[in-house]
Amino acid sequence: MKQVLNYNVHDLLKFQIIINKKFNLINYLNIEHRFFEVNDIDKPDIILNIGKFIPSNEDCYIVNDKYYIKKNYFYCKDSEDRTRWEIEIFGFESGDMIINFDIQILGVRSLLPILSAHNLFLSSVIDYKLSNKGYFLLHSAGLGKNNKAFLLAGMGGAFKTTLAMDFIRKAGFSFFGDERVIFHDGQIWSYPIGLVSFDYRCKYLPTEKKRNFLDKINLVKYNFINYNNLDKLNVNIPEISELSALFFIVKQSTIKSITINEYDLEKAVDKLIINNKIEMNHVYMPNLMGSSSNPYFDYTHAYSFIFPDGLVATRWDSMKKKLMHILKIVPIYAIEIPINYDDFIYNDLYNNITSFLK
């Protein structure tokens, strides 16, 4: 018995999750990628098979006594804390990708019918496959109005999600994503992972931070209740918009009000790439994952050691060259904000950012 889930990301990339189950008692929910779920797809770029498999790891190079590598192929057994997995990837570097993935999640997390740790590597390979097509999943929040959009880029904790919440509920902006946004040739595409969770925060929380354990419970309940009711959410999701400006946000411990300055193109591109590398090590909803980090970055390093001239090893250099070219026409600014967020900070940012969109 198996469950098949299909996804279409704006016709830019298609992927399929196949869950092989001993018993057909429950259907799993993919909270992270729910927005892109469709009934059918043809020719998926990525197929993720979840369940037992027999690896094809013969005639491989072996790195660190656990990574089995050959051209366009990767295999290993790995673990973190109480979560253990075995993974095999065909098409690791190019072509359509097939991932065989068997995972054991111990404890109460294993009882939840949510694809959490099952998605451990999926976002990273989606990122890689899109970049090979010239589309870049930038770690940023995207907001827009009247076909003019802007990105808020920054490290975790820079208030990107809180600002996105306030621009939407206080000023009626549309939402492209608060974790990742797709960027290509001066335009952005929406990539609202965890959309139901974001809608809950907009409705019930003053900031992105959950206040207590009850908020966590209510967030999970809200996801179950609204999983099949995306049309009832309050957040407006456009497909595509012109990118009018890029803002880097960083908190500063001594200032009392925001500062905004123009920012150098090459420094901006370097920051975007560093931010994406750091984000690759993170996982979505780590409490449900049973894992606090994503080892896919380590897997690409091991593969690049064997194939230093391959697409995996050179992807970041290629990304920099392409972003340097397509960001030339986009105004870029650096914003420093105080460490404590309040309505005054939001209003100041709103007035400044909207002035750049006119």
Image: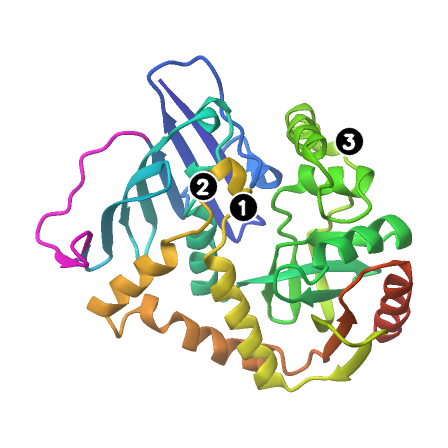
Residue drawn at point x = 19 percent, y = 56 percent: 69
Residue 93 seen from this side: no
Q: Tag 1, which secondary structure?
A: loop
The CA distance from mark 2 to mark 1 is 9 Å
The CA distance from mark 3 to mark 1 is 24 Å
Residues in magenta, as a range = 51-68
Residue designated by label 1: 284
Which quarter of the picture shows residue 145?
bottom right
Residue 1 located left or right of residue 211: left
Q: Amino acid at mark 1?
A: Tyr
Q: Amino acid at mark 2?
A: Asn
- The answer to whether mark 2 and mark 1 are in CB contact below 8 A is yes
State which mark lies toward you, 3 or 1. 1
State which mark lies toward you, 3 or 2. 2
Which labelled disc corresponds to residue 232?
3
Residue 75: in magenta span: no
- The answer to whether mark 3 and mark 2 are in CB contact below 8 A is no
